[in-house]
Amino acid sequence: MRRWTPAVVAFAVVAGALLVTGTPVLDVLRYTAYAALAVVLPGTLVYRALRRTPHTLVEDLAVGAVVGLVLELAAWFVFVSVGAERWLWVWPAAVIGPFLAVPALRRHWVVRGYTPVPAGWAWAVTGVIAGFTAYLWQSFLSRNPILPTSEEQAQYIDLSFQMSLAGAATHQAPLDVPQVAGEPLHYHWFGFAHMGAASLVSGVDLPTVFLRLAVPALCALAVVLVAVVGWRVSQRPYVGVGAAVLMFTIGEFGYENGVRQLFGTQATFIVWGSPSMTYSWVLLIPLIGVLASIVRGDSSRGACVLAGLFLAGSTGAKASSVPVAAGALGITALVLFVTRRRLPWAVLGALGLAVAAQLFATAILFAFENHGVSVAAASGLEPYTSGALSWGFVFVAFLLNMQLRLAGIVALVWRQRMRLLPEQVFLLGGAVVGPALYLVTAHPGSSNQYFMRAGFAFGVILSAWGWAVVGPRVAFAVGFGVLLCAVQLVTGAVSVDWDPPYEPLLPLLSWALALALVFAILGLVSRRRYPAVLLTGVLVAGAPGLVMDAAAAYRYPNGGAYALTPLPASRIAAARWVHDHSDPDDVVATNVHCQGVTADGSCDARSFWLSAYTERQVLVEGWTFAPRMLGDPLGPWAPFWDPALLAVNDAAFSAPTAAGLATLRARGVRWLVVDREVAPESPELAALAQLRYENARMAVYALSTR
């Protein structure tokens, strides 16, 4: 019982955060049963059959869960593509059956010889999970109701689009763009397919899965994965704990100044604002562990199969994962060849798998579309520059803001006099390739920052390794971190403008100079312990990032100062009625395409709520996030690429005719959803279609199938 207490406490914290934010108890229990029986159980059995030797039970369960997610993805595709999505819940039997029937596989049900998990390690990991769950509660769960409760409700603009992908995954494989029926979706959608599968198997309504259950569960799993992979790669248990702290407790270094996204969005915000990033970390972290073992000399068949599985899952989890992993392997192969004067065949084989995975992603998943990514030097730094001399200050600010938590790497390289182990070279390669790709690319929505986020997964393990070698000062880390948070909470935000352009960076640089003075004073009093104290202080200097991001939720609605979209309860009530009364293959048409319209009639076509909450394809809703539109210089104001189709759609509401509605029926449209505040429908529509639902704002008409 004592051994399982930390896990029970971690589960209780996550479940408590869900329950106090309105998640039904039955849904928590259903999702827990789904995760245990349809993900962890089959995945752990397969992982045990593939890995060479057991290490810890927690590693078997955590990495096994990721194997289960990859197997679930394959099962989802098979079942949904043949129209058997309602039977998806039986897929684990395809794994459990053989492990019961085949004598050679039965031994994987009970494993002995595990390494004991230190109690301090277990409780520290539980603490990281509890702390991050508290952040999620404050910034995300408590700010976003499962369904809107008022006409004034607003939501971060990307969430509805992402939920629409998960909704499409409940009945479609591969996915089309939910907002433009029939438009292929060349995108990293695997994480949303997982959410759709979770809803299908657990029976929990998709908005509850998306806005409550999935993100905290994936974050808790990612924390455990960082801890077990850090332990396994370094063979030091507390390196794993340190890596989890650096990734999920320490935020970006800076001073709250009103510009909270200096060089990309907060890594902390990313976990709920872009759940595909969290899903990709869940796949990338065990991939790092397997590749590190291959680099170290484990070229067993099981290791190669696991690497292939995690690479396959990473291809469509996030487009940034595989390039960073491939770059890390390439650097490792080059270093080993130069230092050993022979080809590292195992590393080259792993690199071949990574290249094959990237080719698959580029050709099949993304259809050679670049999604707006282009080659451009320092595009994320350029907005802050003003003349040649300012570039140096901006680059220093970038390193402080985004890379300070990786300072342990410098200490490790210094202590080992640049004689790194092969697995350390691999981790260093990933930590360098990630930000390097960010610095040589550009994207109109700053999505090239995700290369840097992928690099974090490599860097935090190596940085924690250096921290362990130098000697962490745990009590000082906690006390100093609390003090820094208190200082920033008390002093609050600093107002800045953009004249000169680098002014938003000045609070960060001033804060860095102040801390440098503090570190100098510490050097006078700590002396022999100074290297350990200095490194500890530098690594925890970003501790206020998470706290200030959560505190900002008090000043801004819906979790932060990010782009919001209106989400009136009346709209969502109509959408949920359509969901409850329609078939999954039904197409919906609407007169709502714009989040906003300018005085000259230009449409901000980021409207995704109808496809999200109906979980149905919409003939034409908002088209901004369709892959063909990404990179358009007009951004969200770009016009729809098929004006004739848009005209037919809109005429069904403003000037309906029997012929026009027949054209819509031929395209699969069965429902017309009208927002009367955008534009009331023509009186003639009632004679051509059946009014099935209305409220103070919305109306839903059904088209006959004849």
Image (tube, grey):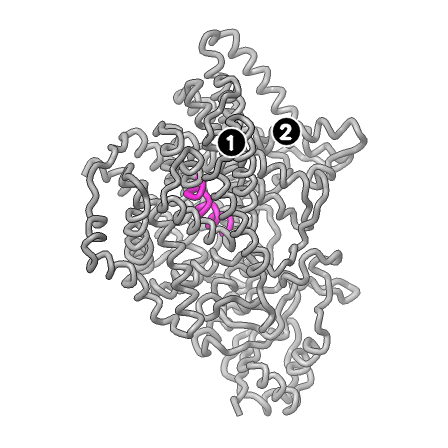
Kindly state the secondary structure of the residue where label 2 is placed.
helix
The amino acid type, in three-letter code, at marker 1 is: Arg
Instruction: Bin the neighbour count of mark 2 within 10 Å (Cα to Cα): few under 14, some 14-19, many 20 and up.
Output: many
Relative height, residue 57 to residue 462 (above, below): below
Question: Residue 307, how many percent across, how many down?
Answer: 43, 46
The amino acid type, in three-letter code, at marker 2 is: Leu
Kindly state the secondary structure of the residue where label 1 is placed.
loop
Instruction: Bin the neighbour count of mark 1 within 10 Å (Cα to Cα): few under 14, some 14-19, many 20 and up.
Output: few
Specify whether residue 372 is painted magenta: no
Specify whether residue 283 is painted magenta: yes
Q: Is residue 542 left or right of residue 170?
A: right
Dominant SS type (magenta): helix
Which residue: 33% across, 48% down?
A: 64
Figure quadrant of the N terminus: top left
Q: Is residue 630 left or right of residue 24?
A: right
Question: Residue 526, how many percent across, how many down?
Answer: 47, 9
Question: Residue 474, how many percent across, how many down?
Answer: 39, 22
User: In terms of sequence position, does the residue under pointer 2 or pointer 1 come before the other?
Assistant: 1
Relative height, residue 479 to residue 282 (above, below): above
| Residue 489, visible in the rendered structure | no
Relative height, residue 618 to residue 663 (above, below): above
Which mark, residue 342? Answer: 1
The magenta segment is 275-288
- Residue matched to label 2: 508
Which residue: 46% across, 73% down?
A: 579
User: Which residue is the extreme one toward the right?
Assistant: 387
